[in-house]
Image (tube, rainbow, N blue to C red):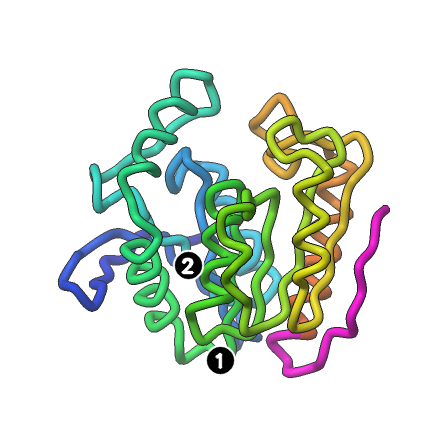
């Protein structure tokens, strides 16, 4: 459904982004933020699925600042490689690329970010720094960034069995939720539970989180308020 486009950040950096258009008039725009595996087949499919729901979806290739065309699988070696690329990218540089992606879809209306793993962390930072209407965080590591405050509502998805993000790390997120945000924990789900190409894929949790994400996006991108809620399910 989508195709690659070339974008330019404000500092002159050119990079690729997977852009998927909806079949009819856009209901809004979604910036899909990659894991440490690049804009691979899974992330492109995620963007295409949001486009099928009526949104203009764009997934910027954030690793282009380090090396172009990075597309990794989910092997341990790829995880180590991707994590190495991510460590070379200060958040302020990545936010420039996210801002450029947001600007590229400005004609589609209000925008939100949806990020996974590393992208979940960046989705939170986008909520703190960029003019967006909402942000969705899938198992983002936020402990180092909770001094920053989101400027829009955030929807959080975490797995109860995520070995890299223990339950204790979620309590400060709940406590700091402002403006009104929603945090869900999925019993039996591990890190990466949304990705059907990972061993940790949890189809029930992924489907439930997707439904909640689509509801959140409908509310945020149509201008409705999301009531305060902190839930476990």
In this rendering, is residue 37 above or below 73? below
The residue at the point 64 percent across, 80 percent down is 222
* Helix, strand or loop at mark 2: strand
The residue at the point 59 percent across, 52 percent down is 137
Q: Nearer the viewer, residue 12 or 149?
A: 149
The reply to whether residue 37 is visible in this rendering is: yes
Furthest toward the front, the residue is 147
Q: Which residues are magenta?
A: 220-233
Q: Position of residue 216 (x, y in %)?
A: 69, 66
Left or right side of 100 for 13: left
In this rendering, is residue 139 above or below 101? above
Left or right side of 123 for 224: right
Residue 109, labelled with which disc?
Answer: 1
Q: Which callout, 1 or 2, points at the residue further toward the start of the chain?
A: 2
The residue at the point 56 percent across, 57 percent down is 50
* Helix, strand or loop at mark 1: loop
Q: CA distance from mark 1 to mark 2?
A: 13 Å
Q: Position of residue 108 (x, y in %)?
A: 46, 77
Residue 158 counted in the magenta span? no
The residue at the point 60 percent across, 57 percent down is 136
> Which SS does the magenta portion mostly show?
loop
Residue 229 counted in the magenta span? yes
Q: List the residue tagged with mark 2.
A: 58
Furthest toward the bottom, the residue is 223
């Amino acid at each position: 459904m989508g195709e690659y486009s070339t974008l330019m950040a404000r500092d002159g950096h050119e990079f690729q982004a997977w852009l998927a258009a909806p079949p009819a008039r856009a209901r809004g725009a979604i910036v899909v933020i990659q894991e440490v595996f690049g804009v691979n087949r899974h992330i492109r499919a995620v963007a295409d699925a949001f486009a099928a729901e009526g949104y203009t979806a764009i997934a910027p290739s954030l690793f282009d600042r380090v090396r172009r065309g990075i597309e990794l699988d989910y092997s341990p070696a790829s995880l180590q490689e991707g994590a190495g690329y991510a460590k070379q990218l200060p958040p302020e540089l990545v936010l420039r690329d996210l801002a450029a992606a947001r600007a590229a879809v400005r004609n589609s209306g209000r925008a939100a970010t949806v990020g996974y793993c590393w992208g979940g962390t960046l989705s939170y930072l986008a909520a703190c720094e960029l003019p967006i209407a909402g942000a969705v965080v899938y198992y983002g590591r936020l402990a180092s960034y909770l001094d920053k405050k989101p400027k829009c509502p955030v929807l959080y998805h975490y797995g109860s069995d995520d070995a890299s993000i223990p339950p204790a790390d979620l309590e400060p997120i709940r406590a700091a939720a402002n403006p009104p945000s929603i945090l869900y924990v999925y019993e039996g789900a591990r890190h990466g539970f949304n990705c059907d190409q990972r061993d940790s894929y949890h189809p029930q949790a992924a489907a439930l989180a997707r439904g909640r994400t689509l509801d959140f996006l409908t509310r945020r991108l149509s201008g409705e308020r999301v009531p305060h809620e902190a839930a476990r399910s």
